[in-house]
Image: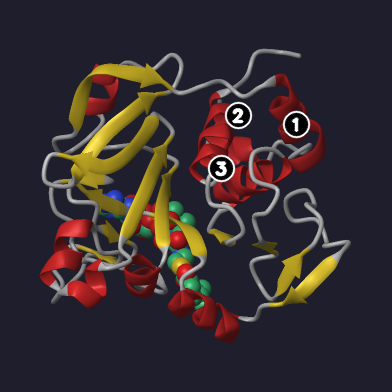
């Protein structure tokens, strides 16, 4: 088995973000999140409930983008909203920007009155972040993604959720931010970004230089674990034999 790649490390880090969730609905948005969630279901958390991202709960764990062979239930978008409101869900979204208070933006770049770039719109982010455990995946860590203040708040971080009142703060749970350089949470001082681990081969200074905002660093920062041999076999031979993950993390 050849050395593990950064993409493999990211997949295992994302799997770890879902490892302790138990029997809840995992909603991974994007390729590496989908890979990590399926890896978690095949290893640390077999109770995780997964879907094809469109309308079907899956009983098995098919490779990325393969047709589901065993279907367990019906989960079109309108029913996803029922699960969102009810709570037992962990969503991993993308983040065009994320700020040091854990707010996320997938809506627009620039001044709100006249944005320079229109992105996806906030989509499910506001409802997700006040109802469900929410994590973010950032495939290209850079100062324009990790910013002091997001241009538009799509996903709400802990401080803003508290400002909005107890109903918004009660279930706000920004769990992990996994980037191609490291793993973060929002348990730094005053609920700000904290570096939990750097991926193998990455230094803390590299992470800080690649970030446009302050990030809290504990005295001893861990190194993100490498995937086990079992996980590498699952990633390479079962879930992503075509190497689609290298489109997002080309290492
Ligand atoms: C930037 C930056 C930056 C990009 N700073 N500029 C520039 C400055 C870049 C380009 C231009 C475009 C529950 C639920 C839902 C549902 C359920 C309910 C959700 C029903 C489903 C449907 C719904 C939300 C899911 C995500 C988002 C995942 C992404 C990104 C992308 C690419 C990574 C794929 N920092 N960045 N620019 N959605 N997507 O130079 O300029 O902007 O750049 O939960 O929906 O409604 O509710 O982004 O942009 O999680 O993360 O979108 O938009 O394609 O092309 O990179 O080149 O044009 O000059 P992109 P990109 P230029 S949950």
The residue carrying mark 3 is: 19
The residues tagged by marks 3 and 1 sit, at their Cα atoms, a distance apart of 20 Å
Q: Indicate if the residue with disc 3 has its beta carbon within 8 Å of ligand 1.
A: no
Quadrant of res 159? bottom left
The residue carrying mark 1 is: 236
Check whether the beta carbons of the residues at disc 1 and disc 2 lie within 8 A of each other.
yes
Q: Residues within 10 Å of mark 1 (few under 14, many from 20)?
A: some
| 194 displayed left or right of 176 | left
The single residue placed furthest to the bottom in the displayed view is 78
Q: Which of marks 1 and 2 is nearer the N terminus?
A: 2
| 163 displayed left or right of 8 | left
Residue at point 27%, 68% (across, down): 170
Q: Which of marks 3 and 2 is nearer the N terminus?
A: 2
Q: What element carries label 1?
A: helix
Residue at point 32%, 72% (across, down): 126
Residue at point 22%, 34% (across, down): 211
């Amino acid at each position: 088995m050849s050395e593990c790649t950064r993409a493999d490390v990211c997949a295992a880090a994302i799997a770890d973000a879902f490892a302790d969730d138990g029997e809840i609905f995992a909603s991974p948005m994007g390729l590496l999140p989908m890979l990590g969630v399926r890896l978690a279901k095949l290893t640390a958390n077999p109770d995780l409930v997964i879907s094809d991202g469109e309308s079907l709960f899956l009983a098995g764990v098919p490779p990325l983008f393969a047709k589901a062979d065993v279907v367990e239930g019906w989960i079109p978008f309108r029913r996803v909203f029922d699960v969102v409101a009810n709570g037992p869900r962990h969503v991993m979204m993308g983040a065009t920007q994320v700020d040091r208070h854990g707010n996320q933006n997938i809506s627009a770049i620039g001044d709100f009155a006249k944005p320079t770039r229109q992105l996806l719109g906030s989509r499910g982010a506001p409802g997700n972040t006040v109802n469900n455990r929410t994590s973010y995946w950032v495939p290209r860590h850079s100062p324009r993604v990790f910013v002091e203040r997001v241009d538009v708040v799509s996903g709400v971080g802990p401080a803003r959720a508290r400002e909005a009142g107890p109903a918004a703060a009660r279930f706000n749970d920004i769990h992990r931010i996994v980037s191609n350089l490291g793993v973060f949470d929002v348990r730094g001082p005053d609920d700000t970004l904290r570096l939990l681990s750097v991926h193998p081969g990455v230094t803390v200074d590299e992470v800080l230089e690649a970030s446009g905002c302050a990030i809290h660093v504990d005295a001893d920062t861990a190194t993100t674990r490498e995937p086990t041999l079992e996980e590498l076999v699952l990633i390479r031979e079962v879930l992503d034999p075509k190497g689609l993950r290298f489109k997002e993390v080309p290492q």
